[in-house]
Image (tube, rainbow, N blue to C red):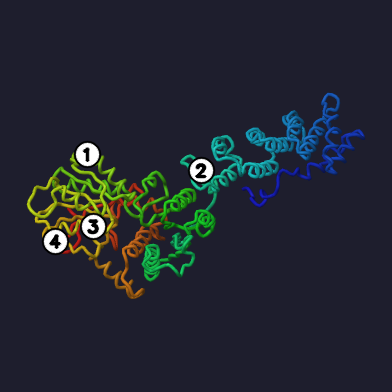
Amino acid sequence: MIHLNKMKKNLLVIPVFFILSLAFAQIPTPDAYRKAQSELAAKNYWEAIPLFKQFTDSKEYGNLANYAAFHLGEAALGANQPAQAIAALEPIINGNWAKADEAKYLLAIAYFKNQQNVEALQTINKIKDDKIMSMAENATFENLKQVSASFMIANLSEFKENKGYGEALKRVLESQTILSATERAAYYELQGKANENKNVVKDQVLDIVVILPFTNSSRSNLSSIPQNDFVFELYQGLEFGVEQLKIKGTQVNMLTFDSKRDAAHLQNLLADPAIASADVIIGPIYPEESDLVSSFAETAKIPFVHPLSNLGERFEELNYSYLFRPSVSSIANGIVEGLRKQNWGKRVAVGYSGSSRDEMLAKMLQTQLGEAGFQLTEFEQINARNVSAFMQGLGVKSGEGAVSVDQVVLLSDDPSIAQPVFSLMESITTSIPTVVMDSWLSFNFANYEMLEFPNFYFIGNNTLNFYGAPMQQFRNRFYNKYLNLPSINSTLGAELINWVSSNMSATKGFDLRRNLDQKAFEAGRLTWGFNFQGGHNNQYVPLFELEAGELKPLD
């Protein structure tokens, strides 16, 4: 095992035991040779170099020439002349003389100083003495800990037995913000080798780390966060969920960190040992922060869960990064499958807002609806000003007239888009299935029970089970603690804790991926449920209807 504290020493300094080595003291030596030894011991390297050089002819000086070349290499390195050291040492490393392995070590140092890293590593591979090899591995770490990852990975297979090489590659990879698939695979391999012969004991406590952007450049004080801020609401739900677990006797610990929306600050946070020892990381929120933590999670093999976003198709290619909510792809699949099952007809109109999620989702639907045999009659970006005209252009308007589509899909969470649509639906006397995001259920202007026809259907997106007994209990307990009812973000935060604890525990084990793959569907406590089997997002995306004022999944 490599001792990194030893590695921190400057290994380019020539070891004293070489300079003072008297293994050849019994060999008769001329006065000029003794003079060379004295100059080397006094670190008068330039004076020692020509004195040793005159004794390097093996035909004339026999075995003494090996020692002269060896000390010539030492002097040349001391004078920062690696090319001279290489020329002196290369001829003497293959013999059977006593200091052959020490000569290989010195030659490797010279190669490193001369930027000949491959030659240095190949020379180290030839060292047989364990003590000299340990020194060479330390030198490998010191000289390669800042080289490019591409060089290290390209040569990993040849030099992976060199422990210093592995430690240097780990250092290089851990210093990077984002790892490629090849770099990540190399890091996994190195971690596997590091854990060989180790008995790693996991305690029985569920350790949760939460990283959220509580403050930023314009809000530096935690006390200034408004209680209706979505980050505060989410945290409140997470905190409440953990407290409820503790009441039930679950051993759980939650540590919270402020990312400050500052990449440099977040990078420093990730060096905290508490984060490295977590069982799961929740948050942060924003893309640049999420990418940073996702890369860390993949490297550290710690599950990272984004709590709110639908944008994370890239997570499907990773091993430890998850969306708690459905991805855009899962939502598209759920919509198409829901329309197919209901058999309302083949003509579909799609309106979508300008948000990243809705534009991406619309493009996926454009392809998938056609592949499923639907006819896309209208496909238009909508906003608060044009959505009423969009709907009326389809024939969805008051008075008589034919509707030109069999169903409408509106992709938006914007209440300013929802309000004119709802007002229009109040005025019509016909039924036209209108599929919208489940966020429309929370808009305070929408009283769906007052509509003449049940036109609205809702797309599942970790939809809350508003009328379930656990939800009523949660709302009451939350109100008793905070004196206000939980928001959607607070409820999702509490449900996220429920989901984590149901899939990571002392009894089930802490392998989130394995536990998720063991079931296709998992009933939620505050939501309708989850399906993470074989995926990294919630693939359970039903369409819902309101029946007698109660939300139910469509059959």
Say what secondary structure mark 4 lies in. Answer: loop
3D distance between C-alphas at marks 1 and 2:
44 Å
The local secondary structure at tag 1 comes to helix
Which of the two marks, 2 or 4, is nearer to us in this view? Answer: 4
| Residue 177 on image: x %, y % | 51, 48
Q: Distance between the residues labelled 4 and 1?
A: 31 Å
Q: Which of marks 1 and 3 is in front?
A: 3
Mark 2 residue type:
Glu
Task: Evaluate if marks 4 and 3 touch, with contact meaning CB atoms under 8 Å apart.
Answer: no
Question: Can I make out residue 518 in this image?
Answer: no
Residue 544 drawn at (x, y percent): 20, 56
Please tell me the numbered disc located at residue 35: none
The reply to whether discs 1 and 3 touch (Cβ–Cβ < 8 Å) is no
Callouts 1 and 2 close, C-beta under 8 Å: no
Res. 547 visible in picture: yes
Residue 451: give its label: 4
Q: Would you name the residue on which mark 2 appears? A: 189
Among numbered discs 1 and 2, the one appearing first in the sequence? 2
Task: Answer with left or right where residue 66 lies relative to residue 445.
Answer: right
Q: How crowded is mark 4: few (under 14 residues within 10 Å), some or many (20 or more)?
A: some
How far apart marks 4 and 3 lie (CA) works out to 15 Å
Amino acid, disc 3 = Ala
Q: How crowded is mark 3: few (under 14 residues within 10 Å), some or many (20 or more)?
A: many
- Of label 2 and label 4, which has the lower sequence position? 2
